[in-house]
Amino acid sequence: MTITPLMPVYPRCDVRPVRGEGAYLIGERGERYLDFASGIAVNLLGHGHPVLVKAIAEQAATLMHVSNLYGSPQGEKVAKRLVDLTFADTVFFTNSGAEAVECAIKTARRYHYVNGQPERHRIISFANAFHGRTLGTISATNQPKMRDGFEPLLPGFDVVPFNDLAAAEAAIGPDAAGFLIEPIQGEGGILPATPEFLTGLRKLADEHGMLLILDEVQCGYARTGTFFAYEQYGITPDIMAVAKGIGGGFPLGACLATEEAAKGMVIGTHGSTYGGNPLAMAAANAVLDVVANDEFLANVRQTGERLRQALEQLLPNHDHLFESVRGMGLMLGVKLKSDSRAFVAHLRDKHGLLTVAAGDNVVRVLPPLNIEESHIAEFIEKLSAGARDYSPAAA
Ligand SMILES: *Cc1c(COP(=O)(O)O)cnc(C)c1O
């Protein structure tokens, strides 16, 4: 037998973390890494944050799980907080981002169904998008590496170019249900939607009776310096998928919707055994306690600005390697002139710095949102040393 007990679907590297302390991960042999990957934008408070740890430990000892057949004081509280903080009127809790997007797609289809237009089932999504790994969510991307061998996929999806409003408009037919878009593509390479594009989609959706579905699984939850990225575009969605940061490391996702968009989601139409259980809600509540205030968000914007400035200063010193920096808040991407995966591996193996590769040869910089000046200095030092002793050809 050559297959590993852990199904070998990930290109796992030699970093084998066993402990975390704030912005650092500690490996099996005691080696330390500066973690500017944060579990891919999940550990927004870093590792072992006392507020989150205490909330989870206390809730685990009190009540870990009950079914959704019972009333949920814990879920009602978190849902109410999210409703108060966002465009939404109602929230469905899931265990992951893909499930949150699935719920969003189902909500959109049900909306048209209860409106007496069941033929309006088609979702328009965008090239290089990432919405998760379920059959539904891989149907909403055009990336062959995710789709190959899993066909036939779900019918009812059109993928059109990102940031091309004319192409999006041209794809609208009588069966169009909505647009599904990441305001800032994460896996695709930290690519923000242009303001004209996102506001244009909002306008098209309104004109054609379609729903605007945002996937803020990666860019949401304070990552860009506002609670959600849509706030910076001056629009609101009808439905939004959230996950990653929402549990600070505890598996949790959520589908948020307006009352109008959620009008088809009545008793019996959807469900989840674990979704929003008391333990998950304790984690969510603790994360909200820390991040959902103006002071924390202003700090993310300031820290993001300092990190971006430091990167912009560094980049010209290595212009054989670096092309540009892009992104918002603490969701930053450094575009390379060569393979970003090789450089991410170099930073990790030779300099103890963790980042994440993304599409378009981008190195994703996704630190915990509560990093300090000293972490930025250490990051820039490691990145600069990494750029100095790196030769793309040898990698
Ligand atoms: C990570 C991600 C998902 C999928 O989340 P999972 O928890 O892995 O299912 C969906 N959309 C975006 C934008 C993501 O970054």
Image (tube, rainbow, N blue to C red):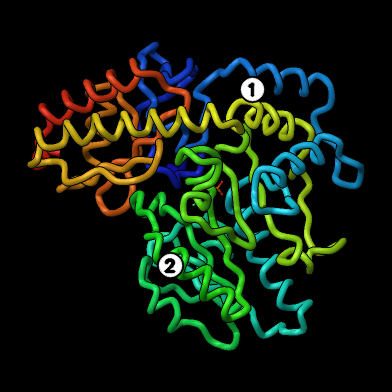
**Is the residue marked 1 within 8 Å of ligand 1, measured from its CB?**
no
Q: Which mark is residue 38?
A: none
144 and 201: which is toward the camera: 201
Residue 70 visible to the viewer:
yes
Callout 1 amino acid: Leu
> Which residue is located at x 41 percent, y 30 percent?
367
Callout 2: CB less than 8 Å from ligand 1: no
User: Whole-percent x and y of residue 358?
Assistant: 33, 47
Vertically, is 276 above or below 168? above
Of 277 and 78, which appears nearest the observer?
78
Residue 168 pos. (x, y %): 43, 76
**What is the crowding at mark 2: few (fewer than 14 residues within 10 Å), some, or many (at least 20)?**
many
**Residue 211 coordinates in the image, percent (x, y):** 61, 70
- As drawn, the label of residue 52 is 1
Q: On the image, numbered disc 2 is attached to which residue?
A: 126
Which one is nearer the viewer's eye here, 95 or 148?
95
Question: Residue type at mark 2?
Answer: Phe
Name the spot of residue 22 as percent of width and height, x first. 47, 18
Looking at the rendered structure, the secondary structure element under dot 1 is helix
Q: Does residue 144 show up?
A: no
As helix, strand or loop, the secondary structure at mark 2 comes to strand
Asked whether, in this view, residue 15 is left or right of residue 346, the answer is: right
Left or right of 59 in this view: 306: left
